[in-house]
Image (cartoon, helix red, strand yellow):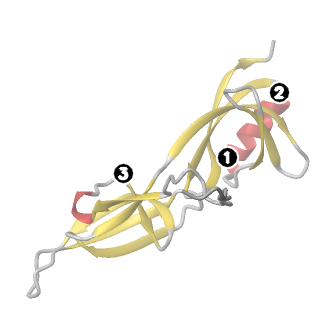
Amino acid sequence: MSDEEHHFESKADAGASKTYPQQAGTIRKNGYIVIKNRPCKVVEVSTSKTGKHGHAKCHFVGIDIFNGKKQEDIVPSSHNCDVPHVTRTDYQLIDISEDGFVSLLTDSGGTKDDLRLPTDESLLSQIKDGFAEGKDLVVTVMSSMGEEQICALKDIGPKN
């Protein structure tokens, strides 16, 4: 063995993939799928019969989970599709800055300051109004494929 030490510069994360493969024929409505490199929630699935060349096709209609745009894709049912890892995490809202960023309290007691307020008007007004009234708010953050967005709000009562 050599006496030299090897130094590796690691720029990778823990090897956690942003997506995992799943056979197209097994993806159902209300599941998730990657269409045109965007994580989507499946709202409609239709399967065509096998044709002359032998592949049944799945037609997916999905809504982008972050911007709400409708996406469509057609994949042979025997082929694999990418399915995004989608996680939801609850954080307590601490502060809203003037430039539209929120300060959130994590479970470990630290703060998370890199999230913008949501673009959805009703959710945005609920968060701002509730915060202005001094309520204790818990926001649900959905994250997938390196993107994060506030998707829901819970009121856990007034601040003591």
Left or right relative to 92: residue 81: left
Contact (Cβ within 8 Å) of mark 2 with mark 3: no
Estimate the x, y position of residue 42 in percent, counting from the top left: 38, 58
* Distance of label 3 from label 1 (alpha carbons): 23 Å
Figure quadrant of the C terminus:
top right
Left or right relative to 38: residue 23: left
Is disc 1 placed on a helix, strand or loop?
helix
Estimate the x, y position of residue 51 in percent, counting from the top left: 10, 83
Residue 3 in sight: yes
Figure quadrant of the N terminus:
bottom right
The crowd level at tag 3 (other Cα within 10 Å; few <14, some 14-19, many 20+) is few
Camera-side residue of 91 and 157: 91
Vertical order, 47 against 131 (above or below): below
Label located before the other in sequence (2 or 1)? 1
Estimate the x, y position of residue 151 in percent, counting from the top left: 60, 45
Contact (Cβ within 8 Å) of mark 2 with mark 1: no
Residue 10 in sight: no
Which residue sits furthest top?
A: 160
Q: Looking at the picture, which amino acid does disc 2 mark?
A: Glu
Residue in view at x 67 percent, y 46 percent: 122
Query: Residue beneath label 1, please?
Result: 122
Query: Residue beneath label 3, please?
Result: 30
Estimate the x, y position of residue 70 in percent, counting from the top left: 48, 68
Residue in view at x 80 percent, y 17 percent: 159
User: Looking at the rendering, which quadrant does residue 132 occupy?
Assistant: top right
The crowd level at tag 2 (other Cα within 10 Å; few <14, some 14-19, many 20+) is few
User: Looking at the rendering, which quadrant does residue 106 occupy?
Assistant: top right
Q: Looking at the picture, which amino acid does disc 3 mark?
A: Asn
Q: Nearer the viewer, mark 2 or mark 3?
A: 3
